[in-house]
């Protein structure tokens, strides 16, 4: 991909990959620290997961305002610095309560860092390079699915559980240094020292007013709900249906990651045909089919094939989704719109995880997977039948739509420059 020929962009993608790998290593260490150092049971492990995810759902709607006020570069640097502190805090935790508190802090940091990262790419690349930029950043972050657990395991085996947190702290430092030399294009920002209610609510109003944004966020919420449900379904499927060891779950995740990363790398060659709300809806529908096939079989080879196809299909959703949102909204509101996407992710997990647990107990693992897949198919079919405005796939139209002047009311933000 030609964007990697630009040294600063290549450094950004490498820093993003290391940062994501460090976050996965921390997740492995969090569960291990809680289970082996503080001897917690299933409820304690679940609390760690909630502590990591709740801040994203709760703070997501608020995260976009500082991104649009100060610029995504500044927020990413601050997020990485705070992430370094929280990682060291987890390593120093001397009680289960302290570990949970630091997990909450780490989740809060990520609720700002993720939408800032998605808002930075449009300020660094040309309009026609948006899909390629989002795909490269996607590959950088998705590499953590394959290498994150491995890095965490190697660090823990060599130096103990705390070493994974130290490794994560180091990746945050690298992330901050990779963003520091960037000089992104500026966008408008508001003046004043505080955040008004109008400024905080602007992202919600924009999402309601622009059909492509509203529909894309709806599709994203459905996708994230299915992922949350499978956080419950997959371990039980491996144990109770395939009757395999936890190592098999790791292999299945690796196969998923290979399909996801390989296809994401091909997206720029496939081109703009994947960047529309209709294409996203089709991807959602096919993901439901692949997910249902994956957990609907007792054959490990068929399960491997199903999870691989699921990974391929997810690749057709994530970078194109970000590209549609970026092109449909003005650049000075990207932070608030991208934070809504991050909010949909956290909220989807919080809704789906407990519901999936109840449904699995009532009808079983494979039947629950079939229900989740059917709901995704229905959502995708409904989304595909609604005409799109067309702003997602045409870079020239999208560029005009993203200017503040294209909004039917006053600009969302004032006229001063942001970093």
Image (spheres, rainbow, N blue to C red):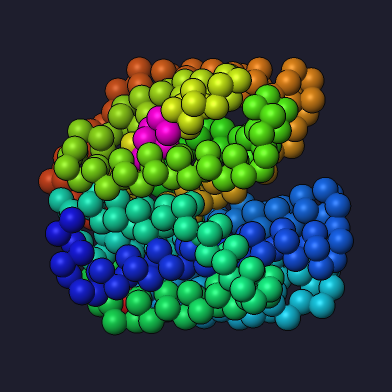
Query: 227 or 219: which is nearer to us?
Result: 227
Q: What residue is drawn where x is 60% and y is 40%?
A: 249
Q: Above or below — where is 150 with respect to 109? A: above
Q: Is residue 354 visible?
A: yes
How many tags in the picture? 0
Measuring from the top left, give residue 10's x and y in whole percent.
25, 69
Range shown magenta = 308-315
Q: Quadrant of residue 386?
A: top left
Q: Is residue 168 above or below residue 382?
A: below
| Residue at left offset 63%, top offset 60% | 27
Q: Quadrant of the N terminus?
A: bottom left
Left or right for 118, reference 254: left
Q: Is residue 345 magenta?
A: no
Residue 56: x %, y % from top left: 60, 56
Say which quarter of the image contains residue 348: top right
Depth order, front residue of 158/122:
158
Q: Is residue 357 above or below residue 68?
A: above
Q: Residue at 75% of width from left, 32% of height from top? A: 357
Q: Which residue shows up at 84% across the image and 49% down it?
A: 43
- Residue 49 at x, y percent in the picture: 70, 53
Q: Quadrant of the C terminus?
A: bottom left
Q: Is residue 297 left or right of residue 282?
A: right
User: 231 or 185: which is nearer to us?
Assistant: 231
């Amino acid at each position: 991909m030609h964007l990697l020929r630009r040294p600063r962009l290549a450094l950004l993608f490498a820093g993003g990959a290391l940062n994501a790998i460090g976050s996965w290593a921390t997740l492995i260490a969090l569960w291990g620290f809680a289970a082996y150092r503080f001897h917690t049971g299933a409820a304690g492990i679940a609390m760690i997961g909630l502590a990591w995810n709740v801040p994203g759902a709760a703070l997501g709607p608020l995260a976009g305002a500082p991104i649009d006020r100060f610029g995504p570069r500044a927020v990413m640097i601050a997020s990485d610095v705070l992430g370094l502190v929280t990682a060291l805090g987890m390593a120093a935790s001397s009680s289960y309560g302290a570990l949970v508190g630091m997990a909450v802090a780490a989740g809060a940091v990520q609720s700002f860092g993720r939408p800032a990262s998605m808002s930075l790419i449009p300020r660094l690349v040309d309009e026609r390079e948006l899909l390629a930029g989002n795909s490269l950043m996607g590959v950088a972050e998705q590499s953590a699915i394959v290498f994150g657990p491995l890095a965490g395991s190697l660090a823990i085996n060599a130096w103990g559980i705390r070493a994974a947190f130290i490794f994560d702290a180091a990746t945050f430092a690298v992330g901050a240094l990779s963003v520091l030399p960037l000089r992104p294009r500026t966008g408008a920002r508001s003046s004043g020292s505080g955040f008004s209610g109008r400024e905080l609510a602007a992202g919600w109003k924009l999402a309601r007013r622009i059909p492509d944004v509203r529909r894309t966020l709806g599709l994203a919420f459905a996708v994230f709900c299915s992922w949350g449900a499978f956080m419950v379904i997959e371990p039980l499927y491996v144990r109770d249906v395939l009757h395999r060891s936890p190592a098999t779950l790791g292999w299945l995740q690796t196969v998923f990651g290979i399909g996801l990363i390989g296809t994401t790398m091909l997206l720029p060659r496939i081109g703009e045909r994947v960047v529309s709300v209709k294409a996203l809806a089709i991807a959602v529908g096919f993901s439901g089919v692949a997910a249902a096939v994956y957990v609907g079989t007792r054959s490990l080879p068929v399960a491997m094939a199903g999870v691989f196809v699921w990974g391929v299909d997810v690749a057709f959703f994530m970078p194109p989704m970000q590209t549609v949102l970026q092109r449909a909204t003005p650049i000075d509101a990207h932070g608030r719109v991208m934070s809504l996407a991050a909010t949909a992710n956290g909220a989807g997990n919080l809704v789906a995880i407990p519901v999936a647990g109840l449904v699995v107990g009532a009808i079983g693992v494979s039947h629950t997977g079939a229900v989740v897949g059917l709901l995704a198919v229905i959502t995708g079919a409904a989304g595909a039948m609604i005409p799109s405005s067309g702003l997602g796939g045409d870079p020239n139209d999208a560029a005009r739509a993203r200017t503040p002047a294209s909004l039917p009311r006053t600009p969302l933000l004032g006229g001063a420059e942001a970093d």
